[in-house]
Amino acid sequence: MAHLPKEWLTEGLIDFEYKKYILLAYLQQVDQAFQDTKLYPHLSDLVFHYQNLVSLRDHKKMMVDLFPKEISKADFEKLSFEYKKMVEDSELIQKLEDIILFAIPAFKKALEQGKDLYEYVEEHLEISAVGLESLYKEEGYVFLKEAHSKETQIYLYQVSIFNNVEEKYRGVHWQHVETIRKHIGETYENLKLQLIKKHKQLPNPSTFLIDVKVPCPLDATLLPIAKRLLVKHIYTEAA
C-alpha cells in the first residue's frame, strides 16, 4: 500500500482490527521509504492524515459529516431535498473514536521519524552565494552539487508569493537548465559567467550553490528540501 486514501477511516468495513491492519501496513511501507532516505510524498501524506485525525478527535461532529447522506424525502415542486444521515449510530462512532485514538500516536511517531530524516539531510546541505548577489532575488540560478558526483545540476528558480486570509506563503519553482561537469581549477563564478552569456534573459542573476554532503534520492528527498532551504536562505538574508 504505497498510498493511504484520504477516506481510509470511513470507507469499507468499520472495524478496529481491520483499520489497524490497514494503518500498520501503510506505516510499515512509510518506514521502509524513510530507511531508504525517501521523504516525499510520504511526509506530506503523514502531515495530512495526522492533522485530519486530530481535528476529528477534537470535533466529533466532523466524524458524522464524513459519511454520505441519503435522500429521505424529495419535494420536486420546490426543488428541495431533505437529507437523512446514514450515521446516527453511537456504537459506530465509538468504533471510529477507538481507531482514531490508536492511529494518532502511530502517525505522530512516523512524523517524528520523517522530521528527524528531514533535519539530518538539511544539516548536510550547504548553501552559499556564487559571486555578487543581485538585489532582485526572486529569480535566478541554483547550482546543485550532489555528494560523490562529478556533475553539477543547474536549475532556474522562481519564487512566487501568494496570500490567503491569514498568512503569506512563498513557493518556489525550479526548472532544470543543464548538467555540467566542472573542470579542475574552474570556479563556480566562471560557470555563472558562462551561464549569463548563454542565457541572456537574466543579465545579473542571483546564483546560489547548494553543496550536498550526503547521498539521497533527488526527487523524493533532495529537491524538496533544497527548495525550502533556498527560500529560507533568501528571506533570512533579506531580513
Image (spheres, grey):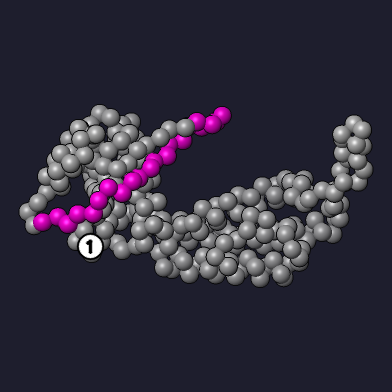
At horizontal 76% and vertical 65% (from top left) the residue drawn is 13
At horizontal 35% and vertical 38% (from top left) the residue drawn is 158
Q: What span is in magenta? A: 163-183
**Residue bearing the label numbered 1:** 149
Where residue 196 sits, quadrant-wise, is: top left
Quarter of the picture containing the C terminus is: top left
Q: Between residue 69 and residue 237, name the one nearer to us.
A: 69
**Residue 43 place in picture, x, y as percent:** 50, 56
**Residue 86 place in picture, x, y as percent:** 85, 52
Quarter of the picture containing the N terminus is: bottom right
What is the three-letter code of the residue carrying label 1? Ser
Q: Is residue 101 visible?
A: no
Residue placed farthest to the front in the image?
A: 77
Q: Any magenta on residue 212?
A: no
Q: Is residue 120 above or below residue 162?
A: below
Q: Any magenta on residue 164?
A: yes
Q: Is residue 32 above or below residue 181?
A: below
